[in-house]
Amino acid sequence: MATFKKYETTNHDRAIEDRRRHKELIEKSVKNNISQIISEESIVEQDGTRKIKIPIRSLNEYYFKYGSQNVGILCGDGSQVKGKHLEKTIVNSIENGIGTSKSEDIFEIDITIDDAIDILFDNFNLPYFNHKKYEEIKLEEGLKHRGLKPAGTMRQLSKKHMMISKIKRQKCMSKSESRVTFHRKDLVYVRTKPKQKRQSNAVIICIMDSSGSMGYTKKYLARSFYFLIYQFIKIKYANIEIIFISHTTSAEEVSEQQFFYRGENGGTCISSGYEKALEIINEKYKHWNIYTFHCSDGDNWTEDNEKAILLAKQLCNKSNLFSYTEIKGMNKYQNIANQYINQLESNNFVITKIDKKEDVWEAFAKILQVENYIEGGGN
């Protein structure tokens, strides 16, 4: 006997769940393939609209899977006992000719670098960010209503108050008038004012060793690291200034273009970069949130190490966070890095090492998670 039921429409959209799962697959793939994404040399030379390809698995629907049809009785070797569980023998289809098992569908999708970076930076924030009362600015965040006015543009027309004015006028008129039209006096417009929000200022100071010992590969690794820092700051924070300092035996403040592309020769004097950073901080950014990042191969003049340590301690005192990243050193750490480890005991100092392209993301993540790492009892 059949039972008929009235068809009822539903607002449930199956595509919503599929879109959510698809988005999760993209996020997972971007994070798993970050080394390939940032290791492309052209990433620093291209804008964020350039598209890259990432692999993702297909979304499979639920279905019934039938068991194997290999049934029958087989002979044992005499060692089996009653009740013993026998494992299934997995046959390698490659060794036995062409296989019949279904492969997993892998697709490549196009995604812009900007979209990939948005996914990567979703859970990161600047550590030790303090809302200081000095050097605050007001940022505009849209508009807010500040009453009504008799004149304005059509976009500012308040339909609600226009209707209220018409109804009031209609109540005052005689009942013989069945239809009351709008009058020019009914038109009122919304008065708007920019909505402002206070935000503490922050400055990012990027110091890079551009001496002759920093060969092509080292400079590329350093540029890739700073590219992540730079893109992270641009996307996550509205009111942050970025200072670029390039140093050999002397240091100077340079433009973004010069910082990423200019190559130099000469020796290395790390203290010169620190001196320039402290000079800029004391001149402009005393009461700001300060984040200092330094990349070098650690091949510093031995006579300069003591001065570099002293200035590094001052940067720790001035900065919310100070990080030193050593690029492809010959030993585990060069002499200057070992001295940093032994003599800089500040919680806001972190040291990382980059030997290959895959290390760039790990160094970036370690630096920005240092606050949580210390609170969790890390060393």
Image (tube, helix red, strand yellow):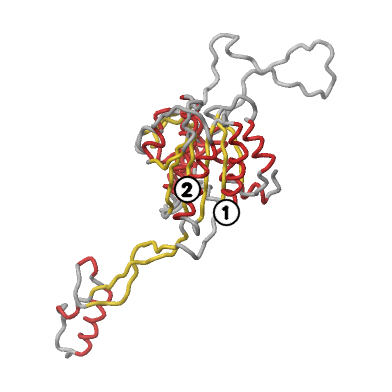
Lateral position of residue 41 relative to residue 94, left or right: left
Q: Quadrant of the C terminus?
A: top right
Q: Nearer the viewer, residue 93 or 225?
A: 225
Query: At which x and y percent is residue 142?
Result: 35, 62
The residue at 26%/80% (across/down) is: 164
Q: Are marks 1 and 2 in contact (CB under 8 Å)?
A: no
Q: Nearer the viewer, residue 190 or 296?
A: 296
| Residue at the spot of label 2 | 204
Q: On the image, which quarter does residue 192 sit in?
A: bottom left
The residue at 36%/37% (across/down) is: 257
* Type of amino acid under label 1: Tyr
Q: Residues within 10 Å of mark 2 (few under 14, many from 20)?
A: many
Query: At which x and y percent is residue 224?
Result: 47, 34
| Residue at the spot of label 1 | 128
Tell which tag, 1 or 2, sits nearer the viewer: 2
Q: Nearer the viewer, residue 32 or 332?
A: 332
Q: Residues within 10 Å of mark 1 (few under 14, many from 20)?
A: some
Badge 2 marks a residue whose secondary structure is: strand
Q: Is residue 28 among what the camera can see? A: yes
